[in-house]
Image (cartoon, rainbow, N blue to C red):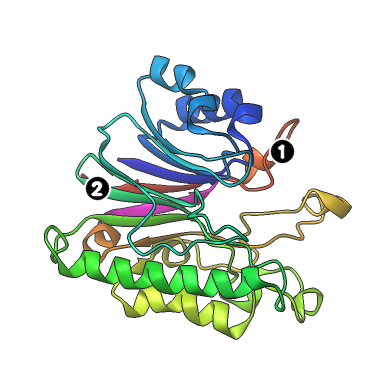
Amino acid sequence: MRLATWNVNSIRSRVDRVLAFLERTGTDVLALQETKCKDEQFPREGFEAAGYQVATFGLSQWNGVAIASRVGLDDVARGFPGQPAFGAAPVVEARAIGATCGGMRVWSLYVPNGRALDNPHYAYKLEWLARLRDQSAGWLAQGTGNPDAQIALVGDWNVAPEDSDVWDMAVFDGQTHVTAPERAAFAAFAQAGYVEVTRQHIPQDRAYTYWDYQQLRFPKNEGMRIDFAYASAALASRTTGVVIDRNERKGKGASDHVPVILDLAD
């Protein structure tokens, strides 16, 4: 089985590119982030014509997550229990969707950005990660969450866990994504029993998944590694390879993120 995650930065702008990616790579399950549309606006017809079922969680032109699967799509959950809200009139944002696909529980996650260290969004980000960590630890401990549990937490984590995950730490001094609290919140998932399989298979430096559109960041390879896949131990043991599809950042109409692809043994 092949599982991929991709912050697509507007599915309506890039649906043709996403469908071509699915055909080219033979991906069975695709977790999407930053779809930027309401549920009724999602261009599901192309996915369905290609043999994929689609589950979406979108409330507005911001955020938005989805899962497309050709191996089944059951028990869809829009948001996770205890997910914190944000805003003047607090809303549980469209940042998490879960579904069971081919016996694997997949969560597509778009972690809050944080914006700035003195911004309320930063505290929200840390709370969001802590609540998700608590819930995901429980998933390993209950019901189907046994030693054979097949759980994948994939998406745009908006955290660069190591200094080598950004092109220049000096540029990020005093900024989000690299602070000790954010990195500790990310590491807490490993402490809960999950394995971050992308670094396990691609340990080298400068293996970026995101490049800003500004200042020729991509041609200069001034990127960030912020898209990851935490897997339950049983699913991690099935992971035979990981690819960061850097080519998807090239050409007209590219997202600022690229797909991260996991190959799983049957």
Above or below, 56 against 138 in this view is above
Asked whether residue 202 is in view, the answer is: yes
Amino acid at pointer 2: Met
Above or below, 13 against 3 in this view is above
Magenta stretch bounds: 238-245
The picture quadrant where one finds residue 250 is: top right
Above or below, 126 against 155 in this view is below
Q: Where is residue 232 in the image (x, y as percent from the top left)?
A: 27, 63
Above or below, 20 against 181 in this view is above
Q: Kindly report the secondary structure that dominates the magenta region of the rendered protein.
A: strand
Asked whether residue 265 is in view, the answer is: no
Q: Nearer the viewer, mark 1 or mark 2?
A: 2
Magenta-colored stretch includes residue 72: no
Q: Which residue does the numbered mark 1 point to in the structure image? A: 250
Amino acid at pointer 1: Lys
Q: Where is residue 241 in the image (x, y as percent from the top left)?
A: 39, 53
Residue at (34, 80) in percent of width and height: 191
Counting other residues with Cα less than 10 Å from the Cα at mark 1, is it few (<14), some (14-19), or many (20 or more)? few
Residue at (53, 40) in percent of width and height: 59
Residue at (59, 85) in percent of width and height: 180
For the residues labelled 1 and 2, the Cα–Cα distance comes to 31 Å
Q: For this view, does 99 lie left or right of residue 22?
A: left
**Quarter of the image where the C terminus is located:** top left
Q: Which residue does the numbered mark 2 point to in the structure image? A: 104
Q: Is mark 2 on a helix, strand or loop?
A: strand
Q: Where is residue 173 in the image (x, y as percent from the top left)?
A: 77, 81
Counting other residues with Cα less than 10 Å from the Cα at mark 2, is it few (<14), some (14-19), or many (20 or more)? some
The picture quadrant where one finds residue 34 is: top right
